[in-house]
Image (cartoon, rainbow, N blue to C red):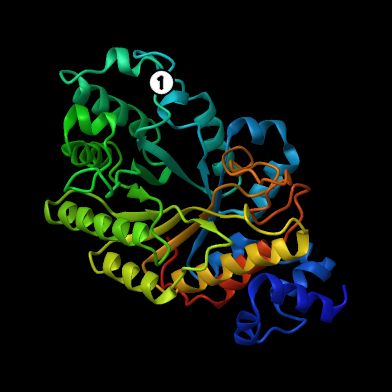
Amino acid sequence: MNRRFFLQTAATVLGTQWLSTAKPSWTHPLFMAMVDPALEAAIPLSDRAAAKGLLYGAASTARKMQQDAAFASAVARECNLFVPENDLKWKALRPSPEQFDFTRGDWLAAFAQAHGMQFRGHTCVWHEALPEWFDQVVTHQNAEQVLTEHIRTVVGHYAGQMHSWDVVNEAIDPVGQGADGLRDTPWKRLLGADYIDIAFHTAAAADPNALLVLNEYDLDYDIPRDAAKREAILRLLRALVARGVPVHALGMQAHLRAAETDFDPVVLRDFLRQVADLGLKIMVTELDVVDQDLPRALHPRDLAVAHTYQSYLDAVLQEPAVIAVLTWGLSDRYTWLTNFRPRSDGAAPRPLPLDSLLHRKPAWSAIASAFDQAPSRLISN
């Protein structure tokens, strides 16, 4: 690729200010990803993360891993942490009120163990992905029993195997949801705000060694919606810690938007520091980059996505409390954005480190560069 054309294209997508600030060279990792065939032989993301005391992982499903050996091999190569995308959600685990089906989760746990990866759970409590029988069976009278039985059974089943659990997922909605900032979910309607405390206490009793996480989205940008979310999550975390609820970490989903301009690393780092000051760890749990509003052309689109990864991780990884980064998927071959954030031009989205042919992209190189430049943690988590 002609260097001048490449820089002009990058300037069109990202703006000349970024190019002058970043002081690009033809050997910059983002550029090398497009021209250097040796990238395929470079050190995997798992090893780069581990060198700094971090974990890198990705999400997928048992079916995809079982049916696609090449993809499973890429996951084993790139990751030292794995999370089931759907296989540990209520709908997957609970075919009936009396039955638990651990078939897919157990297969993934065995895969992770066989390949030296740590395993994490997603999710104990969420307002979506509930089984069809839920509304007919769960009432105000039995809701606490149903919730605690589920968590005791599922978390207990994997006790000793889990690095961490997303115990409560997406509990915050500060706009129009009342003074407490909590989302109006089936669990809140049935049990009140106490459902969060109940869930964490039950999970801690079922597996005292797992890191217990409160997972949330829209915490990343310097816009009113995200600012309100950050304030609400801080209020909730402070209250949980003050009550002695065993919450150990904040999970930041980080579904980023490459066309978004309202990203302020200073604001984000200040938020992370406030979380860390509560004595909590931080995990980036569902990272990907939406390319919905970017040009169709692959090179400028890939570069913009890569720049989003790099700028976000460069800010986040400065906080020592951040212990892990997980992308929500590894390859563009399998991404939820195909159905949930489709492009108007019909082009396949390209939000992840590997392309649909499992080749490393500029996004991979951006993540690798962010790990390489991150401060070392003293202890790998």
Residue closest to the eye, 161 or 279: 279
Tell me residue 343's x, y (percent). 66, 46
195 versus 241 height, above or below: above
- Residue occupying the point 26% across, 27% down: 147
Within 10 angstroms of label 1, few (less than 14), some, or many (20 or more) residues?
A: some
Tell me residue 297's x, y (percent). 77, 59
- Residue occupying the point 65% across, 66% down: 304
Tell me residue 108's x, y (percent). 55, 36
Three-letter code for the amino acid on which mark 1 is drawn: Pro
Q: Residue at the far right: name it.
A: 2
- Residue occupying the point 66% across, 62% down: 364
Q: Is residue 188 left or right of residue 359?
A: left
State which quarter of the image contains the N terminus. Answer: bottom right
- Count of numbered labels shown in the rendering: 1
State which quarter of the image contains the C terminus. Answer: bottom left
Tell me residue 266's x, y (percent). 39, 77
Residue closest to the eye, 284 or 281: 284
Dot 1 corresponds to which residue? 131
- Residue occupying the point 77% across, 55% down: 359
